[in-house]
């Protein structure tokens, strides 16, 4: 399963390589931060994929899939993430209903084949989502971000007239 995931990740990353060739996204000079800023501004881009009114995939669901893959159990994955089993199960249920097949397969009991594991589709969706996150993260480090960061205040003004 790990080899298949690595293969999918390599395929996705190879498709994202054109992002790195865009001149505007190339690394530029160090950004200028006004003296009023004590720390560099932060950029947070959160990718959510919607299916109707539900979030089919987002950063938390991707982390849950990683944890299920690592622990082989929704319950253990939930514990390591500090969430209830019910919450984790509801998130898995939404993911399984939003894609053209389930992302997580479960088997009850205490045998070696029991627990939870990602399906092939689950591996692919997770790999594509992580590659998309990496591509966005790469794109967010460049001259466009530096230009915005150089004009961003460290705190909002009390009013627009200040």
Image (cartoon, grey):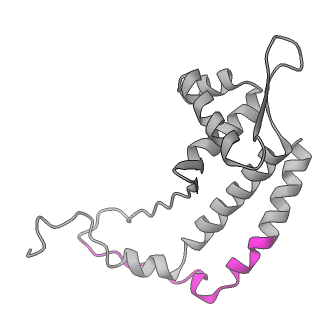
| Quadrant of the image occupied by residue 13 | bottom right
Q: Is residue 101 above or below residue 73?
A: below
Q: Where is residue 101 in the image (x, y as percent from the top left)?
A: 78, 45
Residue extending farthest to the left is 161
Residue extending farthest to the bottom is 23
Please indicate whether residue 11 sits to the left or right of residue 51 in the image. right
Taking the spot 69% from the left edge, 34% from the top edge, the residue there is: 67
Is residue 104 at least partly visible in the picture? Answer: yes
Please indicate whether residue 89 sits to the left or right of residue 117 in the image. left
Taking the spot 62% from the left edge, 39% from the top edge, the residue there is: 94
**Quarter the N terminus occupies:** top right
| Quadrant of the image occupied by residue 150 | bottom left
Q: Which of 96 and 112 is in front in this view?
A: 96
Taking the spot 67% from the left edge, 41% from the top edge, the residue there is: 97
Q: Nearer the viewer, residue 5 or 113?
A: 113
Please indicate whether residue 118 sits to the left or right of residue 113 in the image. left
Q: Is residue 18 above or below residue 12?
A: below
Residue extending farthest to the top is 110
- Indicate yes or no whether the magenta region holds residue 128: no
Q: What stretch is highlighted in magenta?
A: 15-35
Q: Where is residue 157 in the image (x, y as percent from the top left)?
A: 16, 67
Is residue 30 at least partly visible in the picture? Answer: no
| Quadrant of the image occupied by residue 43 | bottom left
Q: Where is residue 42 in the image (x, y as percent from the top left)?
A: 42, 62
Please indicate whether residue 35 sits to the left or right of residue 75 in the image. left
Q: In this view, does 6 lie above or below 39?
A: above
In the rendered picture of this protein, how many numbered marks are placed on residues? 0
Taking the spot 68% from the left edge, 56% from the top edge, the residue there is: 129
Q: Nearer the viewer, residue 10 or 107?
A: 107
- Indicate yes or no whether the magenta region holds residue 20: yes
**Quarter the C terminus occupies:** bottom left
């Amino acid at each position: 399963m790990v080899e298949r995931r690595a293969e999918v990740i390599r395929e996705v990353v190879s498709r994202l390589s054109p992002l790195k060739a865009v001149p505007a996204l190339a690394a530029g000079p160090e950004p200028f931060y006004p003296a009023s800023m004590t720390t560099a501004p932060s950029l947070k881009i959160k990718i959510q994929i919607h299916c109707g009114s539900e979030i089919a995939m987002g950063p938390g669901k991707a982390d849950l899939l990683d944890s299920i893959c690592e622990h082989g159990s929704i319950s253990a994955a939930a514990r390591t993430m500090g969430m209830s089993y019910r919450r984790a199960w509801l998130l898995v249920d939404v993911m399984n209903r939003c894609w053209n097949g389930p992302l997580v397969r479960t088997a009850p009991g205490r045998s070696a084949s029991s627990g939870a594991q990602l399906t092939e589709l689950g591996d692919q969706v997770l790999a594509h989502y992580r590659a998309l996150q990496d591509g966005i993260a790469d794109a967010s480090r460049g001259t466009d971000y530096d230009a915005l960061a150089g004009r961003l205040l460290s705190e909002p003004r009390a009013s627009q007239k200040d």
